[in-house]
Image (spheres, helix red, strand yellow):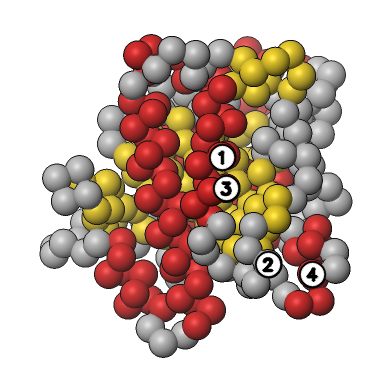
Amino acid sequence: MVSEIVTLQAFLEQWAGEDPTKAEIASTVRTIASTGVGIADLVARGPLEEGLASARGTDPNAGGDTQKELDVIAEECLRAALRETPVAYLASEESEELIALNPRGNLVVAVDPLDGSSNIDTNVSVGTIYSILPFSDEERENPNAAVMKPGTNQLAAGFLAYGPATILVSTLGDGTQVFVYDRDRSEFILAREKVEIPVETKEYGINQSNMRQWDAPMSAWIKDCLAGAEGPRGKNFNMRWVGSMVADAFRIFTRGGVYLYPSDKRKGYENGRLRLIYEAFPVAMLTEQAGGGATDGKTRILDITPHHIHQRIPLVFGSKAEVEKIASYY
């Protein structure tokens, strides 16, 4: 916790100083955060905002998932707001190609406008995940090149969680911070200046109903966890699974644990289900900046080079010792 009130605006200004590139990143983070407040207000209306949880048409979005009405609204809100920032292009789950924004921009934002949208009508926390990347003059002829780089290329990353509180989890490359939106002040307030994910854990989050579909290493790991204190792991585990990644991630940033979304034998899940560029990359950066680990089971997430904007990947992140233990099963 912090002892004095520090707003997001003040935190970003102090971080940016006189550096023009940092000032552009700060401006972009502020815009995403303020846009998220509006999205949170829509989410909070729940069933009163008729139709937000309904599917839009029968075709999936660019990421291959059913598109909800609020998915599209969230992207439209972000697109409109980011036009006024130094962002040249937006890569979004909801759009097949990059979206051109500011022709003079020096940044690219990759975003999942509404993570967990399948939970909109169940009053479960949903959110917005983002990654901020550099955009060079050489890439103006081929904008896709800006996002086809390893996750180590990210300048900043974060997510907003729209739940009982509207929360921003952010990293600018120097630790991970948590800000909470104070509606009395109409400001995001710094709540945790340096998040540290516990190295060890006894808690995991996974959709265990798919166990029969997993490969042998993942099945072996979960079997050993279920064996409890009498088994090879020598301790009892708890399972927590919301199914909305921002909610599951915030739990890990709060008290530790591991999140797992492995590949499996089902059609469409062979290469994992989460998107590399605008889900796995930002969460991995946040996790590592908080002392945790993030892999696809074998390879560090931030070392992977994408081959497609909407590429899917298995994802394991959270408490470092357990992430490494899971990797040892592979």
Q: Label 4 vs label 1: CA separation?
A: 23 Å
Which quarter of the rendering shows the N terminus?
Answer: bottom left
Rendered view: 254 above or below 104? above
Relative placement, left or right, of 173 versus 92 is: left
Q: Amino acid at mark 4?
A: Arg
Residue beneath disc 1: 76
Mark 1 / mark 2, whichever is N-terminal: 1
Residue beneath disc 3: 79
Residue beneath disc 4: 140
What is the x, y in percent for residue 21? 53, 79
Taking the spot 57% from the left edge, 39% from the top edge, the residue there is 75
Q: Quadrant of residue 259?
A: top right
Helix, strand or loop at mark 1 = helix
Q: Label 4 vs label 3: CA separation?
A: 19 Å
Helix, strand or loop at mark 3 = helix
- Assess whether mark 1 and mark 3 are in contact (beta carbons under 8 angstroms): yes
What is the x, y in percent for residue 267? 84, 19
Relative placement, left or right, of 124 versus 275 is: left
Q: Label 2 vs label 4: CA separation?
A: 9 Å
Residue beneath disc 2: 103
